[in-house]
């Protein structure tokens, strides 16, 4: 299930038409992505199954979605093969890291020295997505290049995060506690993952808008190359 805020951001800020793909544990069939110009891996309330990165099962109160795992990992693999623009958000960011051979922490709030990255309890949606902490951008990373920023303040609605960075990925931004908040693959035309939710109020946040604008431009460039 895709929440409308992702579609709105993709249409309004990225300027792309959207196609919704199903969650299939067996993965998305080969050939589907060849008809597309980019993929966006959205957030979700579920967690990546820990057996994908060699960790024991998560507590019973954590949500799982094997079908989402199957689709996401097949999409990432095919996108890398096709050099297809890729944007990962929250769970999508974590899926990218695991697909590249990385691992995840669970319950960051219980780890010494880590911030509580979960959304606040109670309140309204605006409160949940209100900027929660600063990030420092890697000046050599993709995120800094597309935004021309050195730092920003972002929302935070997660309790899992990157432990071991996936092979071939660059850490594009970090939180004050050192947690990696953005990643990119410099070997591809455009592959960016962010731990926060830039799809929320892209009109009012320069960094959020820059992320979707750059993704839309990358999709347009891919289409031009394909049709050349």
Image: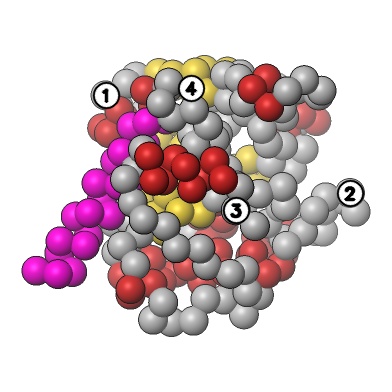
Q: Earlier in the sequence, mark 3 or mark 2?
A: 3
Q: Real-space Cα distance between discs 4 and 3?
A: 27 Å
- Relative to 115, residue 95 above or below: below
In this figure, which residue is indicated by the disc labeled 3? 2
Q: Real-space Cα distance between discs 3 and 1?
A: 30 Å
In-image side of 47 versus 98 (left or right): right
In this figure, which residue is indicated by the disc labeled 4? 135
Q: Can the viewer see residue 161?
A: yes
Q: Earlier in the sequence, mark 3 or mark 1?
A: 3
Question: Which residue does the image show at 52% across and 76% down from the upper left?
Answer: 28
| Stretch of the chain drawn in magenta | 208-228
- What kind of element bears circle 1? loop
Q: Real-space Cα distance between discs 2 and 1?
A: 40 Å
Across and down, in percent, residue 25 comes to 66, 75
In this figure, which residue is indicated by the disc labeled 1? 148
Q: Earlier in the sequence, mark 4 or mark 3?
A: 3
- What kind of element bears circle 4? strand
Q: Quadrant of residue 82?
A: bottom left
In this figure, which residue is indicated by the disc labeled 2? 61
What crowding class fits label 1: few (fewer than 14 Cα within 10 Å), some (14-19), or many (20 or more)?
some
Q: Nearer the viewer, residue 72 or 186?
A: 72
Residue 6 in magenta? no
Q: Which callout, 1 or 4, points to the residue nearer the camera? A: 1
Q: Real-space Cα distance between discs 2 and 4?
A: 30 Å
């Amino acid at each position: 299930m895709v929440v409308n805020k992702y579609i709105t951001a993709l249409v309004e800020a990225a300027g792309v038409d959207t196609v919704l793909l199903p969650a299939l544990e067996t993965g998305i069939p080969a050939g589907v992505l060849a008809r597309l110009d980019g993929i966006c891996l959205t957030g979700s309330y579920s967690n990546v199954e820990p057996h994908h990165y060699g960790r024991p099962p998560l507590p019973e109160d954590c949500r799982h979605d094997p079908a989402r795992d199957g689709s996401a990992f097949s999409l990432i693999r095919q996108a890398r093969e096709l050099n297809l623009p890729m944007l990962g958000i929250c769970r999508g960011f974590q899926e990218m890291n695991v697909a590249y051979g990385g691992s995840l922490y669970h319950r960051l709030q219980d780890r010494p020295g880590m911030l509580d990255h979960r959304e606040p309890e109670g309140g309204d949606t605006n409160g949940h997505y209100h900027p929660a902490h600063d990030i420092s951008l890697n000046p050599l990373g993709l995120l800094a290049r597309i935004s021309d920023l050195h730092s920003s303040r972002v929302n935070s609605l997660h309790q899992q995060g990157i432990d071991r960075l996936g092979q071939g990925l660059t850490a594009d931004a970090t939180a004050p506690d050192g947690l990696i908040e953005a990643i990119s693959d410099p070997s591809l035309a455009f592959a960016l993952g962010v731990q926060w939710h830039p799809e929320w109020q892209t009109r009012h946040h320069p960094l959020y808008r820059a992320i979707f604008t750059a993704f839309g431009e990358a999709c347009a460039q891919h289409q031009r190359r394909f049709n050349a």
